[in-house]
Amino acid sequence: MARKTVVKRQAVLAALLLVSMAMLTWYFREPMGGVLHSTQRGGLRVISPVESGISTALDPFRNSYQWITGILSAQGENERLREESDALRTEVVSLREEAEENKRLRDMLGFVNQPSFPEDYKFVPARVIGRSGSAWNATITINRGTDTGVQLGQTVVSGQGLVGQISAVTTNSAQVLLIIDQNSHVEAKLQNGATTGTVLGSINGLLEMDFVDKNQKVMKNDVVVTSGSGKLFVKGIQIGVVDETADQEIEYFKSVSISPFVDFGRLEEVMVLLPPAGADQPPLVNERER
């Protein structure tokens, strides 16, 4: 029974194929005005309005679909652009930071190459890894210690000028007493003159040059450098410029306000100056007061 059914189906399929081939042959051989061509045109006239109606009915759904897919595509594109923008912003910040660091390092190398750099001295570059959080104690911590030759009392500078002095040290880190600390005393002089005095730090982070003879001429923007007196600091390191002076009748000395070259709030890298072998290590500033 099943075999007869299969044979019937095969016979029907073969018959349909023969009819289709015959009609195709007839269609391609007959003229344009023939029966099959006329039937085709009639069918198209009947079907076209139906297709048009269906297409019109489907337009809102098609438009909605395109609108939704457009929104999803735009959201994906916005997300991609946002990620690219964040990546570019991060790259710009990184490049700016590298440029600032390179500038600071160039400044320090320029300081080392100056004729005023102390003869026979070496230097150890260091990075600032900590800052004091107290207004009473102006210090920084650096990532260099005795294992690189850093010792108590050594002078610390940046590319701009004098930073301070090593006040405590371990094998791999050290504390620097900044010149703006109220316990700091730096023997100094005007770079272009014989006027001398002592640069003092203060609780408000400003610098004053005290013990300046009232008869000495001090002008605004005069450069102040270390004098080397007392061997507390290496001689000839720039400290800052004169901001203003004040004379009082009853005082023997004039008070001189100084703007430091170093921006202590933005210190990132410094150098510790290492004296030549056999040279006396300078005493620590605050040890002199004890």
Image: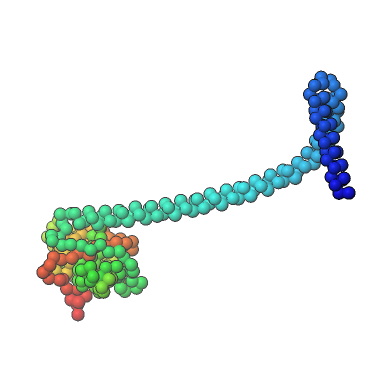
The structure residue drawn at horizontal position 30% and vertical position 69%, both measured from the top left corner, is: 141
Q: Hey, which quadrant is residue 119 in on the image? A: bottom left
Please tell me which residue is depicted at 86% across the width and 24% down the height of the picture. Answer: 35
Q: Which quadrant holds the C terminus?
A: bottom left
**Residue 21 appears at what percent x and percent y?**
80, 30
Q: Quadrant of residue 205?
A: bottom left
The residue sitting at the bottom extreme is 290
Coordinates of residue 264 in the picture (x, y in percent)? 30, 63
Nearest to the observer: residue 252 or residue 37:
37
Q: Is residue 16 above or below residue 71?
A: above
Relative to 190, 61 lies left or right: right
- How many numbered marks are there? 0
Residue at horizontal 27%, vertical 60%?
262
Q: Viewed as shown, does residue 201 lie left or right of 38?
A: left
Whether residue 183 is visible: no
Whole-percent x, y for residue 209 in the image: 21, 65
